[in-house]
Amino acid sequence: MERHERARVAVIGAGIVSPLGFGLAETAEALRQGHDCVTEVTQFCVEQCRCKTAGQIRDETLRVATTTRLQRSERLHRAARMVICALEQVLTQAPQFQPQLTVVGTTSGGMTFGEQYYRSLRRADESRHTPTWIANYLPQKPIVDAQAALGISAPCQVIANACASGTNAVGHAFECIRSGRYERILTGGYDALSELVFVGFDSLQASTPEKCRPFDATRTGMVLGEGAALLALENFDAARSRGATILAEITGYGISTDNHHLTQPHPSGIGPRQAMERALASADLEANEIDYINAHGTATPFNDAAEGKAIAELFSNVPVSSTKGMMGHSLGAAGAIEAVISMLALQHQFLPPNINFGTGDPELPLNIVANQPRKATIRAVLSNSFGFGGTNASVIMQKAA
Amino acid sequence: MNLAIRGMSWVTPLGHEIADVWTKLLESEEADAATVSSPISPHSYFAFRVPETAPTHPRLRRSSAISRFAVAAGMAALRDAGLDSEDTARTALIFATSNGGVIYTKRFYHEIVESGAQAASPLLFPETVFNAPASHLAAILGVTGASYTLVGDGAVGILAVQMAADIMRNESIDHCLVVAAEEIDWLLCDAYRKWRLLRAAPSTEPFQKPARGMILSEGAGALVISREGRIILDRIGPGGNFAKRQCAAGLLRDVYAELEAKDASILVASANGTFIDAAEEEAILQKIPKSLVYTAKPALGEGVAAGAIWQVIAASQALLSGQIPPVLGAPRDSALQIPHTRTEIDPSKHAIVSTCGLNQQIAGLSLSKRL
């Protein structure tokens, strides 16, 4: 059997659009401040929902944040606008970056166009926008449009592994470069709020009418969010030899599937545990070499119990925070956004806070970065994402050496 | 690449046994189109439906059609590959779809629109998620490692094979089960009609000018990618995305060049009666004008993600049987080498699979028979 050298994988550019802000600097500052960006939902009616809040991105802010002419096109979905904005940031840092492949995650792409189409159908109203909605609601469209807007034509593998999609995308992209098959890959994730998805989580009573309080003993659920994040990955040696600025190194990826339930993790935490163990093995690291865990931490009772149990069993007192209390859970974008947050933690040597934390869960003996950021020496970060269908993913990033 | 197709299966409107459906295609049979009516508009549509006699796993009687098709095809492909539950520990799963679980998604959203958010069903919502079919399949097969759901247009099936090839670089993975599936609903037909891609009634006429549209279909296709198998996966051309329809032919030409297609004996096209046909025709005439060109879409319909895997299976069957079926409804005066009767091919040469999606994605691959 053919054996392959394991290439190292560098992050040479990163773009982020989230309720916390646009770009690395704004995001890092918001993380240090522990901003709570969760607000009343304004994009659709939530009168009948238990939960009425989400982390949202203002359309006007999005419009002025980018320079691409296409950004003002009526046919573009909000998710595409977010991806364009993130991709512009990447290309500002890595202007010559031409990926051979793009691997991104999403859960619903341009779903709100599908909703508008269905509502117009119910009203028997043949809107002039109908063909546009239909042609642009498909989940791959935002990345295809963003690439076209900025002169990239790489084939797109669009992963829809529910809430783990973004981390799966980053992890798969990492493995593709590590195997030596590719030199440059664009990776990340995106999702925009939609009524269907919002009501769906509300119907499951997974979202909360209260504050999102990850790992708190009194946690009552998640709030949704939206955003996009992209990372330009390159073979480490190639990037270094041409003098590129290396923001971080991705060193490990683990994926697992627990077949317990379509919407709930196995209470033993076996799925998250396997994903984290496989990521550690992939990175050739011991658990005690991880300095910070950016947890999936949705604040649902089941998720945090399973994830917290797995972390407590595998790691000894490692600092843990979920950043979803600040910006909500952006589903397919979350893993990519949190990969960028992990990278910022490495770059700036601080632990982002787990806000809204009041009382520790006695069942979960974790070192939570409660409410305030901490300065720390961070060499390796592990970031988790888990999703419907029992899909679990973890990536490890390290300071570039 | 050192990869091969070790097992394959399909669930189509024309049947679900590989040999049976292939024989029907060789004998010029086409699936019966069913009428799909909209409850809220005066329109009705034609589509190719999977017969109710198709196999259903007992755990999935209440699941969506797309999950049932995916599981039936996936399990049959594993059987065809001679794999059992002990092999799944070293098997990755990739599920590909374009439209996903449209029936449950529509039902779920319909309740919200008609009765408000309080009427939303927590039982339906998880089935609206794109990776629900993959979750069912992983649970039934006992897959505990890598499981990915890929979304895209008609090229996504080939992108899934490409992803399988990427994953198989990892030596801890012995096999990759690639499954693609779609289900039909009136809502989907309405959408494609308004997108001006749907034909009012059968039969589909590939490569006719002007293009009069396609007929949608449903079902699933599955491939087991391994390091050994009857059909060698020579090359994959993951292509890219065309910004405008008039750019599709150029990208297809690049894919054919990447696949070194000029020596191919056949090309299994994605031509379906839409703008795709002209793009493929232009690229074929420029790059591989002597190749025989086949499309199964007049017989099976446009199965979108599943359709791409059906193309791979058709190309494989052509290599294994040394024959290619007639292309139904194609023009007699085409500049392309289109077989109008069952035709012998040279099975020692390559077969090309060309996929041009309706939503800007293009990909292809080349296959050969292990001699």
Image (cartoon, coloured by chain):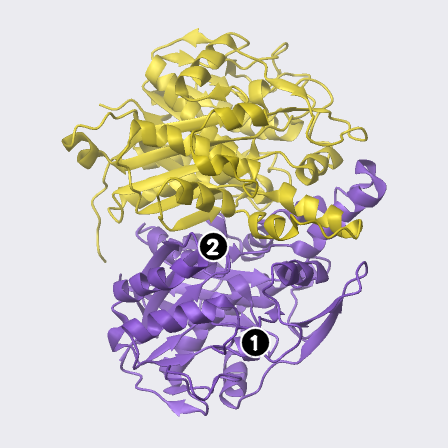
Residue nearer the viewer, A121 or A274: A121
Quadrant housing the N terminus of chain B: bottom left
Give the chain letter at badge 1.
B
Residue nearer the viewer, A154 or B101: A154
Q: Label 2's element?
A: strand
Q: Colour of chain B?
A: purple
Say which residue label 1 marks.
Answer: B300
- Horizontal and vertical percent for residue B292? 36, 82
Give the chain letter at badge 2.
B
Quadrant housing the C terminus of chain B: bottom left
| Location of residue B91 with respect to A378 vertically, above or below | below
| Location of residue B95 with respect to A200 vertically, above or below | below
- Horizontal and vertical percent for residue B162? 37, 57
User: What is the total number of numbered labels drawn onto the structure image?
Assistant: 2
- Horizontal and vertical percent for residue A347? 33, 17
Judged by depth in the image, the label closer to the viewer, 1 or 2, is 1
Cα separation, mark 1 vs mark 2, equals: 25 Å
Q: Residue furthest left?
A: A241
Q: Label 1's element?
A: helix
Q: Residue at x 29, y 77 (%)?
A: B264
